[in-house]
Image (cartoon, rainbow, N blue to C red):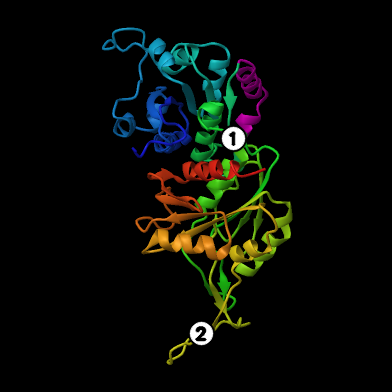
């Protein structure tokens, strides 16, 4: 199986149209994220867009030069017609005030606008501009017109602007934009996309920190990305989602309730309080196995002698959930990260902790990356997935869970 198999945008052809704003540099990240999820990407740029990001950057990423000129004498045919017909969807990123106003009024005097006028598939606008420009009545009329004409808009979000001020006008994050692209295709891009409608799922994510003193702690390198990807995927499939997150600086996915905790005992309490309302619980967090036996109220001073720490076991949250469960729900999913005998350890964890599925990370992958290689281990056997993005792995996990929910 190829690495692209199973990715949510495999086979989709996406045109990224780059407008002329400082946020144009993030279009590079959007292109990469689209490719990471399996899409074939081409790029068109306004002349202003090409002043912010060099066209050669997109040539290197996509394998072909971006389209800059509607009047390209080297192109035999109608470029805008060909591009509009080729693309399954068009992403305008960044969508500036000027670009959206011209598109809303039907202007077609450059390669981007003419291609939008010939679009066969849906068009997604990702606005980015100063907050005062975004709020301008003329801009809001243009946005409303684009939506009335069938366009889709993602963002902007509140955040730090290029001017140094803060407000609504910052480009949505690349992952959020690509998530919105997936939603354009409905069931074609995300199988059984609404199969979690009416279900409540709970996910743990990130590390836990066990404090030694007011300035030091024991922790690990878990990024939280897998748990956050699971939360985003579940929300997109219609679930009510609670995300119990250890210390990590990740954006909360849209529509997800987030509960921030620090230690393993705080995470256990938050999860047990909500267990009864959950149809499925996925423990993606890297929970610390041990904590200091004593917390020092003052900073521990260094000395000439070795420092000895006494550690005590933290609660095994996953095993506790398995013991507390009565009946087939909540469906319980755990994660395992081992350096050797991966599948054997995962199967042992499945049996000892009384869970339904263990997602085993293979040793070539650790913490923090955007992609992983995992195996799904259940009572019937195991399946090793190809290298996938964490979002795609999340969807494969929810595919498994959805089949087992009443």
- Considering the whole magenta stretch, tell me its main secondary structure: helix
Residue 223 position, x and y percent, is 49, 56
Residue 88 position, x and y percent, is 46, 21
Query: Is residue 144 among what the camera can see?
Result: yes
Q: 19 or 258, which is in the foreground?
A: 258
Q: Is residue 146 magenta?
A: yes
The residue under the point 63% across, 17% down is: 145
Query: Is residue 96 among what the camera can see?
Result: no
Would you name the residue on which mark 2 appears? 309
Instruction: Residue 156: give its label.
Output: 1
The residues colored magenta run 128-149
Q: Earlier in the sequence, mark 2 or mark 1?
A: 1
Instruction: Residue 383: give its label.
Output: none
Provide the secondary structure element on which disc 1 rests.
loop
Q: Nearer the viewer, mark 2 or mark 1?
A: 2
Q: 322 or 167, which is in the foreground?
A: 322
Provide the secondary structure element on which disc 2 rests.
loop
Residue 44 position, x and y percent, is 39, 23
Q: Answer with the quarter of the image where residue 264 lies.
A: bottom right
The residue under the point 47% across, 87% down is: 307
Residue 374 position, x and y percent, is 42, 51
Q: 79 or 55, which is in the foreground?
A: 79
């Amino acid at each position: 199986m190829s690495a692209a198999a199973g990715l949510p945008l495999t086979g989709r052809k996406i045109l990224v149209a780059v407008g002329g704003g400082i946020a144009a540099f993030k279009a590079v990240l959007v292109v990469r994220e689209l490719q990471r999820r399996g899409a074939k990407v081409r790029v068109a740029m306004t002349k202003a867009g090409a002043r912010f990001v060099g066209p050669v950057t997109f040539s290197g990423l996509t394998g072909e030069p971006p389209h800059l000129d509607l009047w390209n004498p080297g192109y035999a045919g109608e470029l805008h017609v060909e591009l509009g017909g080729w693309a399954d969807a068009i992403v305008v990123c960044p969508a500036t005030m000027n670009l959206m106003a011209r598109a809303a009024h039907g202007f077609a005097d450059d390669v981007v606008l003419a291609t939008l006028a010939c679009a066969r598939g849906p068009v997604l606008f990702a606005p980015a501009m100063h907050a005062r420009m975004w709020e301008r009545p003329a801009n809001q009329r243009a946005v409303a017109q684009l939506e009335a004409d069938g366009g889709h808009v993602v963002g902007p979000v509140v955040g730090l602007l290029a001017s140094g001020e803060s407000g609504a006008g910052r480009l949505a994050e690349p992952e959020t934009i690509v998530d919105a692209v997936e939603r354009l295709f409905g069931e074609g891009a995300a199988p059984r996309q609404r199969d979690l409608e009416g279900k409540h799922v709970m996910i743990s994510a990130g590390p836990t920190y066990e404090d030694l003193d007011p300035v030091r702690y024991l922790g690990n390198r878990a990024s939280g990305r897998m748990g956050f990807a699971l939360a985003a995927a579940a929300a997109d499939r219609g679930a009510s989602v609670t995300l119990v997150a250890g210390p990590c600086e990740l954006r909360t996915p849209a529509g997800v309730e987030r509960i921030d905790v620090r230690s393993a005992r705080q995470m256990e309490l938050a999860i047990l309080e909500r267990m009864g309302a959950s149809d499925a619980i996925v423990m993606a967090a890297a929970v610390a196995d041990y904590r200091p036996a004593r917390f020092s109220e003052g900073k521990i001073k260094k000395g000439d002698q070795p420092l000895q720490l006494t550690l005590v076991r933290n609660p095994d949250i996953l095993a506790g959930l398995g013991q507390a469960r009565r009946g087939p729900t909540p469906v319980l999913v755990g994660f395992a990260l081992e350096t050797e005998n991966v599948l054997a350890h995962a199967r042992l964890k499945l049996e000892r902790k009384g869970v339904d599925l263990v997602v085993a990370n293979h040793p070539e992958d650790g913490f923090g990356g955007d992609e992983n290689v995992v195996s799904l281990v259940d009572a019937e056997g195991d399946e090793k997935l190809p290298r996938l993005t964490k979002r795609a792995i999340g969807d494969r996990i929810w595919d498994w869970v959805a089949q087992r929910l009443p």
